[in-house]
Amino acid sequence: GPVSQPEEKTRAAKMVRTIVPQVETRRVSLTVHGELIPARRVVMEPEVRGRIVRQHPLLIPGGRIAKGEELFAVDDTLSKLDVRGAEAAVKRAAADLSEAKRRQAEAKRLADEEITSKTELAARDAEVAIEQAELEQLQAARDRAGELLLRHSVKAPFNALVTEEAVEDGQQVNPGFAAATLVGADEFWVRVAVPMNQVQWISLPRD
């Protein structure tokens, strides 16, 4: 039979285009999943003992409360009486100090005229020092009572979203009682898990 003779095949040349790569900076996008968490979180606790007399109508889970708004208030009747008593004690101590200074001045005049002894003057000086210390101590007690009176009103420290609350009108509370949990409403974070092969694309602070 006939004998076939193979023909040589020639491979056609491929067209190519060459370019010079340019180095540039680009933003790399990574697709990851994460959990939304609050940037700020605080547990509100009363600093005084007493009965809840009022509370914010939105102090409920999911309620939004603006910064500075009152969350709840503790009965301040006893604290007001403490402030009045402290102010009266300060006035009495101030009067005692004034009288002690008058006696001190009199003793100094008599000592200068050598009518009385230096010992009497020293006693009057000590009396003034004692009365002065007593006045300062009572003033500190008055200031503390006034500060405690202000703390009967518990206010939101920032624009907040209520996640938990445990107070009701008429409820008795003590310092340290977890009355409500707030999270900041202005900013949230997303905690994500990044695959190890994509961490190289993230610029981390050197410090």
Image: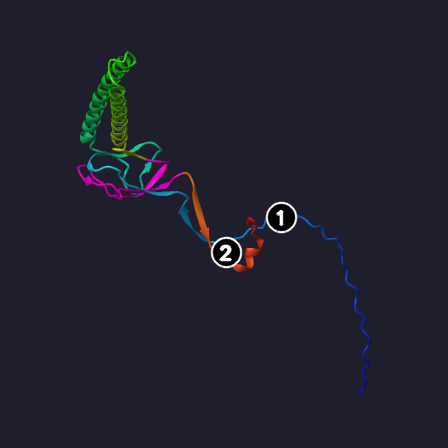
Determine whether 191 is above or below 64 in the image: below
Q: Secondary structure at mark 1?
A: loop
Q: Secondary structure at mark 2?
A: loop
Q: Which residues are magenta?
A: 156-185
Question: Of 170 and 98, which appears nearest the observer?
Answer: 98
Determine whether 158 is above or below 34 in the image: above
Q: Is residue 71 left or right of residue 8?
A: left
Position in image of residue 152 (x %, y %)? 25, 33
Residue 101 lies in quadrant:
top left
Q: CA distance from mark 1 to mark 2?
A: 19 Å
Taking the spot 35% from the left edge, 38% from the top edge, the residue there is 160
How many residues crowd mark 1 within 10 Å: few (<14), some (14–19), many (20+)?
A: few
Q: Is residue 191 magenta?
A: no
Task: Look at mark 2 in the image and give the residue it sits on.
Answer: 194
The amino acid type of the residue labelled 1 equals: Arg
Residue 124 lies in quadrant:
top left
As drawn, the label of residue 187 is none
Position in image of residue 42 (x %, y %)? 34, 42
Task: Look at mark 1 in the image and give the residue it sits on.
Answer: 26
Q: Is residue 172 magenta?
A: yes
The first of marks 1 and 2 along the sequence is 1
Determine whether 31 is above or below 46 in the image: below
Position in image of residue 116 (x %, y %)? 24, 16
Question: Of 28 and 11, which appears nearest the observer?
Answer: 28
Taking the spot 41% from the left edge, 48% from the top edge, the residue there is 36
Q: Is residue 8 left or right of residue 24?
A: right
The amino acid type of the residue labelled 2 equals: Val
Mark 1 or mark 2, which is nearer to you?
2
Taking the spot 24% from the left edge, 41% from the top edge, the residue there is 175
Q: Is residue 165 left or right of residue 171?
A: right
